[in-house]
Image (cartoon, grey):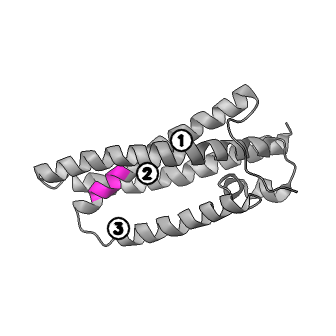
Amino acid sequence: MKVIGLFASLWAAVGICALLGTAIWRLSSRASEALRFELSHLQWILLVLWAFFMAYAEGFKGFQKSFSPRTAARIYHLASSTNLLHSLLAPFFGMGYFHATKRTKIVAYSLTIGITLLVILVRLIPQPWRGIIDAGVVVGLTWGVLSLIIFILRSFVKGKPDASPELPNM
C-alpha cells in the first residue's frame, strides 16, 4: 500500500460518509418537524411501516448487499493505486462514477438522477407526510453509512475486500 493511496482511501471514505451524513442530518430535521404534529394512529402506523421498509429496501438490500461492499472494495483498491485523478476525485471514484464497469456507472448515474428527482418531488409534499417519508429515508441512510464503515474496516483488517471493485477490463 502506498501513502498516496492510503490518503486517497481515507479521502474517499470520509467524503462519501460526509455526503451521506449531511443528507441524514438535513432529513432528520425534516423528520423531527413531523413529530411536532399530532400524528393520527394511521400516520404512526405508516411511519413505523415505512421506517421498516426503508431499513430493508434501502439499508439492507441497497446498501448492505450492493453499494457498501462494492464501494468498500473500490476504496480498498485506491490504497494500492498511484493514479492522481483517482486520488483527487476519490469519493466519486469510490461511488463508481468513473473508472468502473458500464453497469456500475449506469447504476451510479441513474440512482443519482432518480434520487434527485425524488428529493424535488418530496419537497412538494406537506408536513407531516414529508417528515414521515424523510424518517424512513434517515433509517435507510443510517443503516447504509454504518454498513459502509463496517465493510471498509473489514476490507483493511482482512487485507482484501468482500466484493469486486467492478473496475473496467483493461
Q: Is residue 27 left or right of residue 78?
A: left
Relative to 32, say whether 106 is above or below.
Answer: below
Q: Is residue 63 left or right of residue 82?
A: left
- SS class, disc 3: helix
Q: Tell me: 35 left or right of 64.
A: left
- Rendered position, 38 above or below 159: below
Looking at this view, is 80 or 168 the one in front? 168
Query: In the image, which residues are magenta?
Result: 131-136
Principal secondary structure, stretch drawn in magenta: helix
Question: Which amino acid is tagged 2?
Answer: Ile
Residue 110 visible to an observer of this rendering: yes
> Label 2 to label 1, Cα distance in Å?
17 Å
Mark 2 or 1: in front is: 1
Q: At x 81% / y 59%, what residue is drawn?
A: 85
Q: Is residue 99 magenta?
A: no
Residue at disc 2, secondary structure: helix
Picture quarter with the N terminus: top right
Which amino acid, by three-letter code, is at mark 3? Val
Q: Is residue 71 left or right of residue 32?
A: right
Measured as percent of width and height from the top left, residue 156 is found at: 72, 32
132 magenta-colored:
yes
Percent from the top left, x then y, of residue 104?
Answer: 67, 58
Residue 152 quadrant: top right
User: Image point 50% across, 49% down: which residue?
Assistant: 21
Residue beneath the point at 53% across and 69% down:
113
Residue that carries the numbered disc 3 in the rendered image: 122
Q: What amino acid type is highlighted by mark number 1?
A: Gln
Q: Which residue is mark 2?
A: 24
Find disc 1 in the rendering and name its residue. Answer: 64
Q: Tag 1, which secondary structure?
A: helix
